[in-house]
Image (cartoon, rainbow, N blue to C red):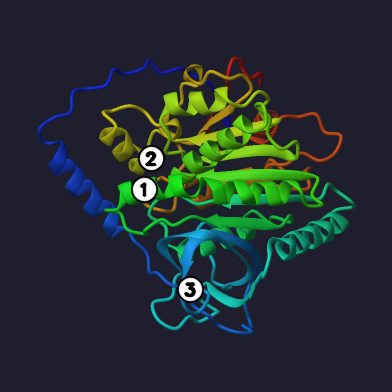
């Protein structure tokens, strides 16, 4: 693996052309063509499967029948525990979707669901799962991760994506999915952006529940438009606490963030001290962010910007994965759908207890571990804001 760093000269925004509307319609149709089947599918007590992954769920969506949720907004925060079965035929980075009734040997499916009556029940389950994982890992820190999905994602896709992430990365720590009310339709981008604004308080509540539980460390992971939701929520928490975030937040991972760089810098300015680990996965080949940049007047999003000098905070690792190909067709989820990149990210934490989380006593940073274990025959560009990495 070759490690390089480089800088890109910033581009000036172009004037919006008369043909932009036609291009938007075409691009939206392209995104819609990549849509996946929807709806939670149950297969009670599945047998002959690869694994059953527990996923804790917090959602601001309106509930439907059969433990499914719609794209409608709900002021109430719903909490539950889902068991998702992974088929034996599963390929790394993929979600094997059923068209009708799922076959557990070939498709993702929900084995069971356990709603929580109150937040304390969620906290208790979270604490128990973290303690069990800690015991298996020779009393490592009691850690947990929170995953915030992106744009154009219905509830079933967010649930199965969380299960895929947990399975493919061999996550030992419990994973909570925050599923906000995305419409799950490519043409409703503005609706999704508005849903981000309505979900900040609920996401803040989940982060506070995790921080006030028996956990030692929290890893926050967000994808695409979910990165804006996460950063807006962290800004909101910081402003209410004299610039401070909960001390248990150990790491922040933004995957293909659909977020304006100026907005990102403004959000960062509200936070006095960032968590020890802060990483951004970016790609110049991200077609979804190319469209988002186009709609914004050709201004780069954080997720397709590889010029770390535009980020006005020290210590943030920018990882350019442009040479990797994602399994989603748009290169918008490369970090979690590219088998080779998943293998790298798993390998770089081989000496650690958890993905994206250093073991007790280790002094290496996230970027150090990437550099030390980069062995694939691809170029991975790794840069740290206001610092240059040494090989």
Residue 308 visible in the picture: yes
Q: Which residue is mark 3?
A: 40
Q: Is residue 280 shown above or below 229? A: above
Badge 2 density bin: few <14, some 14–19, many ≥20, Cα 10 Å: many
User: In this orientation, which residue lies closer to the viewer: 49 or 276?
Assistant: 276
Q: CA distance from mark 1 to mark 3?
A: 24 Å
Q: Residues within 10 Å of mark 3 (few under 14, many from 20)?
A: many
Per the image, the residue denoted by label 1 is: 330
Q: Foreground mark, 3 or 2? A: 3
Instruction: From the image, state whether disc 1 or disc 3 is nearer to you.
Output: 3
Query: Is 326 above or below relative to 175?
Result: above
Label 1's element?
Answer: loop
The reply to whether the C-beta atoms of the residues labelled 1 and 2 are less than 8 Å apart is: yes
Query: Which residue is painted at 32% across and 58% down in the image?
Result: 185
**Distance Cα–Cα, label 1 vs label 2:** 6 Å
157 relative to 134 in the view: left or right = left
| Residue 307 x, y percent position in the rendering | 46, 21
- Residue 223 percent coordinates (x, y): 50, 45
Q: Which residue is mark 2?
A: 286
- Where residue 304 sits in the image (x, y, percent)? 41, 32
Q: Look at the numbered disc 3 and give the secondary structure of its residue.
A: loop
Local SS, label 2: loop
């Amino acid at each position: 693996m070759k490690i390089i760093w480089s800088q890109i000269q910033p581009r000036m925004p172009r004037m919006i052309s008369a043909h932009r509307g036609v291009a938007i319609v075409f691009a939206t149709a392209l995104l819609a063509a990549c849509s996946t089947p929807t709806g939670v599918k149950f297969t009670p007590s599945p047998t002959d499967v690869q694994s059953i992954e527990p996923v804790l769920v917090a959602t601001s969506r309106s509930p439907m029948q059969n433990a499914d949720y719609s794209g409608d907004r709900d002021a109430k925060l719903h909490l539950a525990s889902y068991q998702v079965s992974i088929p034996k035929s599963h390929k790394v980075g993929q979600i094997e979707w059923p068209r009708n009734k799922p076959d557990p040997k070939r498709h993702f499916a929900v084995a069971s669901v356990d709603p929580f009556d109150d937040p304390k029940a969620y906290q208790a389950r979270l604490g128990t799962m973290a303690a069990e994982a800690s015991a298996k890992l020779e009393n490592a820190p009691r850690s947990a991760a929170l995953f915030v999905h992106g744009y154009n994602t219905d509830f079933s896709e967010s649930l199965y994506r969380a299960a895929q992430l947990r399975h493919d990365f061999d996550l030992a720590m419990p994973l909570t999915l925050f599923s906000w009310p995305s419409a799950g339709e490519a043409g409703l981008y503005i609706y999704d952006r508005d849903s981000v604004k309505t979900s900040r308080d609920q996401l803040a509540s989940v982060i506070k529940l995790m921080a006030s539980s028996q956990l030692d460390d929290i890893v926050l992971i967000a994808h695409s438009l979910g990165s804006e939701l996460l950063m807006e929520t962290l800004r909101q928490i910081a402003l209410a606490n004299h610039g401070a975030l909960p001390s248990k937040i150990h790491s922040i991972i933004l995957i293909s963030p659909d977020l304006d760089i100026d907005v990102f810098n403004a959000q960062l300015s509200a936070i006095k001290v960032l968590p020890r680990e802060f990483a951004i996965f970016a790609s110049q080949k991200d077609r979804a962010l190319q469209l988002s940049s186009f709609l914004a007047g050709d201004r780069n999003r954080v997720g397709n910007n590889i010029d770390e000098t535009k980020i006005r905070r020290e210590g943030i690792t920018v990882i350019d994965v442009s040479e990797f190909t994602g399994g989603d067709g748009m290169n918008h989820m490369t970090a979690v759908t590219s088998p080779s990149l998943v293998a790298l990210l798993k390998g770089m934490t081989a000496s650690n207890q958890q993905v994206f989380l250093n073991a007790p006593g280790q002094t290496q940073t996230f970027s150090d571990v990437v550099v030390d274990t980069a062995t694939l025959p691809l170029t991975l560009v790794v840069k740290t804001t206001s610092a240059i990495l040494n090989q």
